[in-house]
Image (tube, rainbow, N blue to C red):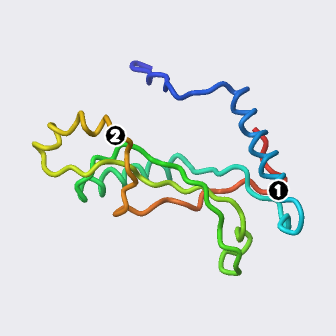
Amino acid sequence: MKNPPAKPNQLITKEFAKQLNVNYNNKKAASLTGKRAKKEDANAVWYSLEALESYIHYIKTHGAQDGYNVDGIRFYFGVYPDDEQHGEKAGLTTLFLVPTGKKVEDSTAQVQSFAKIQESAPADIQSLDPMNYGNIGRPPSLIY
C-alpha cells in the first residue's frame, strides 16, 4: 500500500470494547426485568460498508446543496414503537445516524467562518434524513 491510512485517534482497545459491551448488556438486562422482558433486546447494530459509504455520500452532497458544511455523524439510540407495524423489531433498541454540521452563508463566509465552525459543537442537520434499519443482533445476543 503506497499511502496507508492514518490510524484514527478514537480507537479503543478490544478489552475496553468488551468491557463496554458487557456493561451495556448487564445494565440493559437489569432494566428489562419483570413483565417488560418479553423478548431479548438488540445489543448490536450492523451496517454494510456500502450502506455507510452511500449515506456519507448522500449527506455530503445534499448537505452542501442545502448550504451546510457536513462535519460528522451523530449516532442516536432509539426504541421502535411497540406495535404491529414494526413486527419483530417492535419495542427493541435501534441505532440511527444523523448528519451534523454548520450552515455556511456563502463561499467567502465559509473561509472566514472555518475557525468558528471548529470552535462549537456540531448541530444536527434537520434538512437531511437520518439513517436507520441496520441489522440488529438477534437472540442469542451478540457478545463482543
Whether 103 is drawn above or below 87: the answer is above
Q: Which residue is mark 1?
A: 139
Question: Label 1 is placed on what type of residue?
Answer: Pro
Q: Position of residue 51 (x, y in %)?
A: 50, 53
Task: Report helix, strand or loop for mark 1.
Answer: loop
The residue under the point 78% across, 47% down is 27
CB under 8 Å between discs 1 and 2: no
- Determine the residue positioned at 74% across, 33% down: 18
Q: Where is 20 relative to 12, above or below?
A: below
Q: Residues within 10 Å of mark 1 (few under 14, many from 20)?
A: few
User: Where residue 1 appears, x then y in whole percent?
Assistant: 45, 20
In this rendering, position of residue 39 left or right of residue 144 = right
Mark in the foreground, 1 or 2 = 2
- The answer to whether residue 83 is left or right of residue 131 is right
Q: Residues within 10 Å of mark 2 (few under 14, many from 20)?
A: few
Circle nearer the N terminus (1, 2): 2
- Using the numbered discs, state the Cα–Cα distance from disc 1 to disc 2 in whole angstroms: 41 Å
* Residue 103 on image: x %, y %: 25, 52
Q: Going by the image, does 24 lie left or right of 104? A: right
- Number of numbered discs present? 2
Q: Residue furthest left?
A: 108
What amino acid is found at the position of numbered circle 2 in the picture?
A: Ser
Q: Position of residue 65 (x, y in %)?
A: 23, 57
Q: Which residue is the extreme one toward the right? A: 34
- Whether 83 is drawn above or below 125: the answer is below
Disc number for residue 120: 2
**Which residue is painted at 73% across and 26% down in the image?**
15
Residue under the image location 57 percent in, 27 percent down: 11
